[in-house]
């Protein structure tokens, strides 16, 4: 087989964003509810600044309220925890996201722990991780939610498929494994100690790479016809000395073998922000005790 279908994450994210905007318009009209997302950035990491700006822009484009807090790099942990306490109490703020990574003096686990689990739109709080694990309603991390929707672009049902996830982080690999189990996949989680990773990967009908190693997954690791979701975002230098983004999958090789594949950029990345908007609407509705608008019923996790 030659020439996998390219799964267009930008187009899918735009569709999700449209649904969010329609849902928000109805919430404003019918319930006088404007979902609000607060994003906190500590320091001036250039990549984080771009992410935060994009999140704010998409939030307002969807008709929601965006609150941005830019704190200096030398902010103390106590000051950040105090900011979170205020946001936890604010009735206008339904979702809180603290952009990672944080400066050295701040312990990220303590910060995540301080966020009200019902406002934890990143889904990183241990309460939300637990809710996902046992199948209770909660907030699910955005990137894994996006991965499942992308995989469903290629396959109507994931039921019964072999899914292999390379990477076991708390923000991608582990929650994605839970979501794929919920889809009735047979799930394998591989990592840096996995023996014969290429052979494990070749079992996959759905292969997800969330590693952070440029082009680790080669064409001959892929089962012909497999759906390949590339979460990795790696900045590498081209021969001409310019920077470019590549995924964890060697795209040119992989697309000759796979049935469908997400590109980098333009695959998982745009979906992560789109799912953040969905999570914010979901958090707002739960806090007000109203049903999730029907536009978002098939999109929301947890
Ligand atoms: P982490 O560094 O937290 O986890 C990486 C995982 O990959 C670990 O489980 C590690 O194994 C495993 N790993 C590392 N090297 C190898 C190897 N050689 N073979 C097999 N497994 C390996 O990363 P994240 O989960 O946070 O992110 C992964 C990638 O996804 C990054 O490139 C990141 O930038 C990107 N990302 C993209 C997002 C998006 O919106 N598109 C959102 C979040 C992340 P072990 O546990 O054994 O160390």
Image (spheres, grey):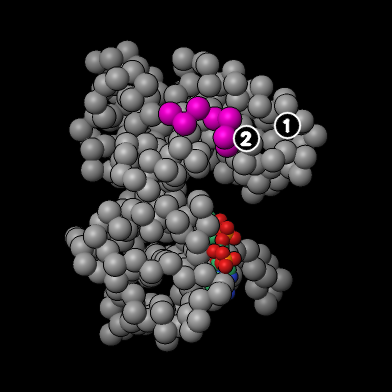
Displayed quadrant of residue 227: bottom left
Residue corresponding to mark 1: 77
Please tell me whether residue 62 is drawn above or below residue 166 in the rendered image.
above
Please tell me whether residue 204 is drawn above or below residue 36 in the rendered image.
below
Magenta span: predominant SS is helix
Q: Residue 255, percent across and down?
A: 38, 77
Disc 1 secondary structure class = helix
- Contact, mark 1 vs mark 2 (Cβ under 8 Å): yes
Residue plotted at (24% across, 15% down) = 30
Residue 1 horizontal side relative to residue 171, left or right: left
Displayed quadrant of residue 67: top right
Please tell me whether residue 247 is drawn above or below residue 99 in the rendered image.
below
Badge 1, how many Cα within 10 Å: few under 14, some, many 20+?
A: some
Badge 2, how many Cα within 10 Å: few under 14, some, many 20+?
A: some
Q: Residue 250, percent across and down?
A: 49, 76
Front residue of this view, candidates 94 and 58: 94
Q: Any atom of ligand 1 within 8 Å of the CB at mark 2?
A: no
State the mark number for residue 111.
2
The C terminus - image quarter: top left
Q: Residue 206, percent across and down?
A: 33, 69
**Gap in Å between the C-alphas at discs 1 and 2?**
8 Å
Residue plotted at (44% across, 24% down) = 94
Q: Residue 79, percent across and down?
A: 72, 25
Which stretch is magenta? 111-118
Disc 2 secondary structure class = helix
Residue plotted at (48% across, 84% down) = 196
Any part of residue 44 in sight: no
For ligand 1, which image quadrant applies?
Answer: bottom right
Q: Any atom of ligand 1 within 8 Å of the CB at mark 1?
A: no
Residue plotted at (38% across, 29% down) = 283
State the mark number for residue 136.
none
Front residue of this view, candidates 20 and 170: 170
């Amino acid at each position: 087989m030659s020439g996998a279908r390219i799964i267009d994450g930008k187009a899918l994210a735009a569709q999700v964003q449209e649904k969010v905007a329609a849902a928000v318009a109805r919430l404003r009209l019918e319930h006088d509810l404007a979902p609000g997302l607060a994003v906190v950035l500590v320091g001036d990491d250039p990549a984080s600044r771009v992410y935060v700006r994009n999140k704010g822009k998409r939030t307002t484009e969807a008709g929601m309220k965006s609150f941005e807090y830019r704190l200096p790099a030398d902010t103390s942990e106590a000051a950040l925890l105090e900011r979170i306490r205020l946001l936890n109490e604010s009735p206008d703020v339904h979702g809180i996201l603290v952009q990672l990574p944080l400066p050295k003096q701040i312990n990220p686990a303590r910060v995540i722990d301080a966020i009200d689990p019902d406002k934890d739109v990143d889904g990183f709080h241990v309460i939300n991780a637990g809710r996902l694990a046992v199948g209770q309603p909660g907030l699910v991390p955005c990137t894994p939610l996006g991965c499942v929707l992308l995989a469903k672009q290629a396959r109507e049902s994931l039921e019964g498929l072999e899914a292999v996830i390379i990477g076991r982080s708390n923000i991608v690999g582990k929650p994605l494994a839970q979501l794929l189990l919920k889809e009735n996949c047979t799930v394998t989680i591989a990592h840096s100690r996995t023996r014969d990773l290429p052979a494990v990967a070749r079992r996959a009908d759905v292969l997800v790479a969330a590693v952070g190693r440029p082009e680790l997954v080669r064409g001959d690791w892929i089962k012909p016809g497999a759906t390949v979701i590339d979460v990795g975002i790696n900045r590498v230098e081209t021969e001409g000395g310019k920077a470019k983004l590549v995924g964890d999958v060697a795209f040119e090789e992989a697309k000759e073998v796979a049935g469908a594949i997400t590109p980098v950029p333009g695959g998982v990345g745009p979906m992560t922000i789109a799912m953040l908007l969905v999570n914010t609407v979901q958090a707002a509705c739960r806090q007000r005790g109203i049903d999730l608008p029907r536009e978002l019923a098939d999109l929301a996790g947890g």
